[in-house]
Image (cartoon, rainbow, N blue to C red):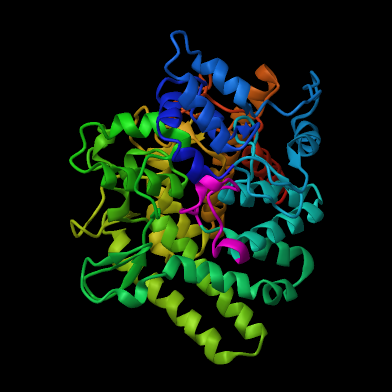
Amino acid sequence: MDIQNIFSMGELFERVQMQHIFPDGKTFVDCIPRSSLASIQERYEAEKNAGEFDLPGFIHDNFELPGERESHFESVEGCPITLHIENLWNELIRQPDEVSGSLIPLPHSYIVPGGRFREVYYWDSYFTMLGLQVSKRTDLIQNMVDNFSYLIDKTGYIPNGNRTYYIGRSQPPFYACMVNLLSAEKGEAILLKYLPQLEKEYNFWMNGSDLLNFEGFSSHHVAMLQDGTILNRYWDESNTPRPESFKEDSELATHADDKKIMYRHLRAAAESGWDFSSRWFKDPKDFSTIHTTEIIPVDLNCLLFNLEKTIAKAYSLANDAAASLKYQTAAGNRKAAIDKYCWSITGFYFDYDFVARKQKESLTLAAAYPLFFEMASKEQASRVAKILEEKFVSAGGLITTTETTTQQWDAPNGWAPLLWIAILGLAKYGYDELAGDIAKRWMGINEKVYRNTGKMMEKYNVVSATLEGGGGEYPAQDGFGWTNGVYLALAEWMKTQ
């Protein structure tokens, strides 16, 4: 299904999404048409004014719903959590695709997160791979790196997920981390093999940087700051409601001064993976003040620092000193810029609002990224560790931000990828006791929920272990790729502590 065509079906698409024919908007855009969209549109026009037109019936007659994959998998009471996760890999694996609805076919097998997420997701996959590494499933790690390389070659970047409605945005750029992970298993020649795709990924994020010539000017994913420095932001090429969340986006933008700008901010936040968080709001309690594209996120720029360092290393292996120096210099400049614009004298890293020319005030776990990528000084790491211990540590690990809201990427929720970044970041600077304590708390809540439900969840309420993680546009999901991966990786890491 070409999602641009289904979206352009206009009235039919909007009626289905706005009337909530399905539990969430993603269901319809994942449907497979039983005939051509043109013929379905023709039937709709002929039948829609009938006295007793049955819209749900019409959709079911003309579209094949994305039914849950037939599964006979059941949790076995008393099964150790690590064995349960090992057994889940085969449940979450998907084989090479054929063209099917909005799905973008991939040439190799891969792991999906689970629940409503029936396709591969970009940044999820790195944390899933951490578990696959522990499980000795290098074959799947290789396949997933090759799938993402295929997407880079095909579209010029890695989309949010392998659905046509995700075209126009990416997700946090963990591709270099994936390549380094595979390199740890297969040797440094891997960096040379994927150097072309690493550079294409970099060029996607830096697209438009040659057009910037004055402070505050931005283009695509780049913005120029006061001293001429160029840093990155999240962005989406479209400024319309997300097809998979059409109703939610449309209703939020009802009273917006400029709906197109609002939609762009929403889409950019979706690209961040933190959809949604008060981190992206001017007023932490007011979703309508979202302004994502005006923000330089500290974590995104740390990831691009890592991409620059990885490309520099690959060129060094290729004996191209000039190219290696180019990327080493870019990484050095980015590190200096992060220190200048995102480090605060209060002892923490903050996002930077380049339009207002000031740091944001939200305390978030994005501040752990400079530690994970070893960009912080010892003094900076010490001060970040102190604030994490004082303000973020909770019964079940770490809250995501210090704001308690209805958004899923705020307190009281904790998320596996951010726990991994924070724990490993602290450990890299010698805060082993704090890192180990946080890991035990997180693994403990994973284990408690597993004992009670037989499931691994997408997110957890780390403040109250008696409650599920909440907030967001959809119910809590079980599966769950990145939670499984991080649990296995932490269990392995804990053996060394």
Q: Residue at x 62, y 42 (%)?
A: 482
Q: Is residue 292 magenta?
A: no
Q: Residue at x 43, y 64 (%)?
A: 376
Q: Is residue 212 visible?
A: yes
Q: Quadrant of residue 67?
A: top right
Q: Position of residue 16 (x, y in %)?
A: 46, 25
Q: Is residue 162 magenta?
A: yes
Q: Position of residue 107 (x, y in %)?
A: 74, 55
Q: Is residue 460 visible?
A: no
Task: Using the image, determine if residue 131 lies above or below residue 395.
Answer: below
Q: Position of residue 177 (x, y in %)?
A: 60, 61
Tell me which secondary structure the magenta stretch mostly adopts: loop
Q: Residue furthest top?
A: 52
Q: Which region of the structure is painted magenta?
A: 153-172
Q: Is residue 98 left or right of residue 324?
A: right
Q: Residue at x 52, y 59 (%)?
A: 173
Which quarter of the image is occupied by the N terminus? top right
Q: Position of residue 74 (x, y in %)?
A: 78, 21
